[in-house]
Image (tube, grey):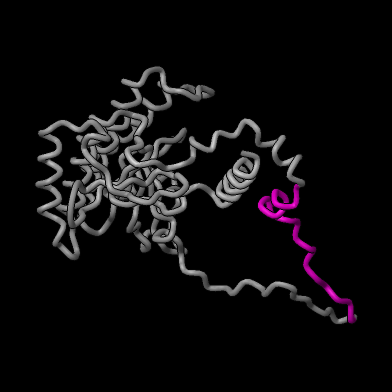
C-alpha cells in the first residue's frame, strides 16, 4: 500500500469483510482498492468503531446466504444510517476526500490508461518466421441474440415483461440522485429504464412531506449557483439524502454525490433484447 497515494475518492459500501466498509475509488493506478484497514486513514477510533459496527449489523441481518432483508424497516434503518455515517466520514476527511454512498461514477474513478491496447487483427512474427495471431473472438451476446431465428427468439423471451423496463411519466423510480438544479426539486431520476425522456421528479411521485420539500428547496437555493461546492456541500448533501431516504423507503436508492451512468440505464444486452421483443410483438399485433 502506497501511503503517498492517499485516497481522494472513497465509497462507503457494506460487504462481508474484516476491515472498514470503505473502498478506494480514486482515479489513480496507486489506488488502494479495499476494504481499507483500520488506522491508515486518520479517522477517529469512535468513527472507525461505528463503521465496523454498521457493517457487522449488515452481516448479522443478512447472514451468509440470505438474499433478502429481514424486514423493510431494518433495511431502511440501515440505509439511512449509512447516509449519516457518510456525512460524519466526510466531516472527518475534510475536503481532500470525496465520500460516496450507494453509487460511484466509474468514469470518474477510472485510472488513466498508460498502455495502448493492440489494434484488432494484429499479428506478430517470431524469430523462426512463425506467425502469431489472436484467436477469433466469439460473437458477443448481442450478436448471438440477433442471429437467432424469430421463432426461437420469441420462444425464449415469451415471459419477458417489457413494461418492467419501460419508463412512463409518473412512474416510481428505483434510483434518484440528489443534485442541485435550476428549477424544481433537486432530485433526478436515475432508474435504469428504456426511453427515460424526463429525469425530473415531483414531490407527489415520491410522496414527500411538506417540511422535506421545503428543506430540499432551501438546499437547492443554497447550492445551485455555486460553481465549485466544497466540504459543506458534501456534508449537507449526505444529511439531506438521509432525510429523503427515510421518507421514500428502502426500495428507492438515494444517491449522493453522484450516480454511475452505466448503472442508470439498462445494459446494452438488455436494451437490444427489449428492442427486438418490442419489434416482434408490434409486428404480431
- Viewer-proximal residue among 219 and 54: 219
Labels in figure, total: 0
Residue 280 placement: quadrant: top right
Q: Is residue 70 visible?
A: yes
- Image position of 164 (left or right of 230): right
The x and y percentages for residue 144 are 73, 51
When the figure is inspected, residue 97 is found, relative to residue 65, above or below; the finding is below
When the figure is inspected, residue 127 is found, relative to residue 28, above or below; the finding is below
When the figure is inspected, residue 43 is found, relative to residue 248, above or below; the finding is below
Residue pictured at 21% horizontal, 57% vertical: 95
Residue 7 placement: quadrant: bottom left
Can residue 78 be found in the magenta stretch? no
- Image position of 24 (left or right of 121): left
The x and y percentages for residue 12 are 35, 42
The x and y percentages for residue 25 are 40, 54
| Image quadrant where one finds the N terminus | bottom left
- Viewer-proximal residue among 281 and 262: 281
Can residue 138 be found in the magenta stretch? yes
Residue pictured at 15% horizontal, 62% vertical: 226
Residue pictured at 61% horizontal, 39% vertical: 285
Q: Is residue 53 visible?
A: no
As drawn, which residue projects farthest toward the front?
Answer: 285
Residue 133 placement: quadrant: bottom right
- Image position of 285 (left or right of 217): right
The x and y percentages for residue 187 are 25, 46
- Viewer-proximal residue among 86 and 250: 250
What range is drawn magenta here?
Answer: 129-148
Amino acid at each position: 500500500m502506497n501511503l503517498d497515494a492517499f485516497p481522494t475518492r472513497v465509497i462507503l459500501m457494506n460487504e462481508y469483510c474484516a476491515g472498514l466498509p470503505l473502498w478506494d475509488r480514486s482515479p489513480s493506478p496507486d489506488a488502494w482498492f479495499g476494504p481499507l484497514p483500520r488506522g491508515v486513514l486518520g479517522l477517529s477510533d469512535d468513527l472507525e468503531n461505528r463503521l465496523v459496527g454498521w457493517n457487522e449489523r449488515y452481516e448479522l441481518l443478512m447472514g451468509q446466504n440470505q438474499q433478502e432483508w429481514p424486514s423493510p424497516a431494518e433495511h431502511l434503518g440501515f440505509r439511512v444510517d449509512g447516509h449519516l455515517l457518510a456525512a460524519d466520514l466526510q466531516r472527518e476527511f475534510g475536503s481532500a476526500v470525496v465520500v460516496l454512498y450507494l453509487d460511484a461514477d466509474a468514469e470518474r474513478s477510472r485510472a488513466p490508461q498508460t498502455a495502448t491496447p493492440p489494434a484488432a487483427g494484429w499479428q506478430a512474427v517470431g524469430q523462426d518466421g512463425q506467425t502469431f495471431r489472436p484467436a477469433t473472438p466469439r460473437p458477443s451476446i448481442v450478436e448471438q441474440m440477433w442471429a437467432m431465428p424469430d421463432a426461437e427468439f420469441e420462444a425464449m423471451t415469451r415471459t419477458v415483461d417489457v413494461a418492467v423496463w419501460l419508463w412512463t411519466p409518473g412512474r416510481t423510480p428505483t434510483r434518484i440522485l440528489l443534485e442541485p438544479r435550476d428549477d424544481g426539486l433537486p432530485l433526478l431520476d436515475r432508474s435504469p429504464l428504456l426511453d427515460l425522456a424526463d429525469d425530473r421528479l415531483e414531490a407527489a411521485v415520491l410522496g414527500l412531506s411538506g417540511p422535506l420539500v421545503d428543506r430540499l428547496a432551501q438546499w437547492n437555493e443554497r447550492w445551485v449557483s455555486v460553481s465549485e461546492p466544497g466540504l459543506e456541500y458534501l456534508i449537507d448533501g449526505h444529511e439531506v439524502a438521509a432525510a429523503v431516504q427515510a421518507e421514500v423507503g428502502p426500495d428507492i436508492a438515494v444517491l449522493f454525490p453522484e450516480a454511475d451512468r452505466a448503472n442508470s440505464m439498462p445494459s446494452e444486452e438488455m436494451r437490444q433484447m427489449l428492442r427486438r421483443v418490442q419489434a416482434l410483438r408490434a409486428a404480431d399485433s
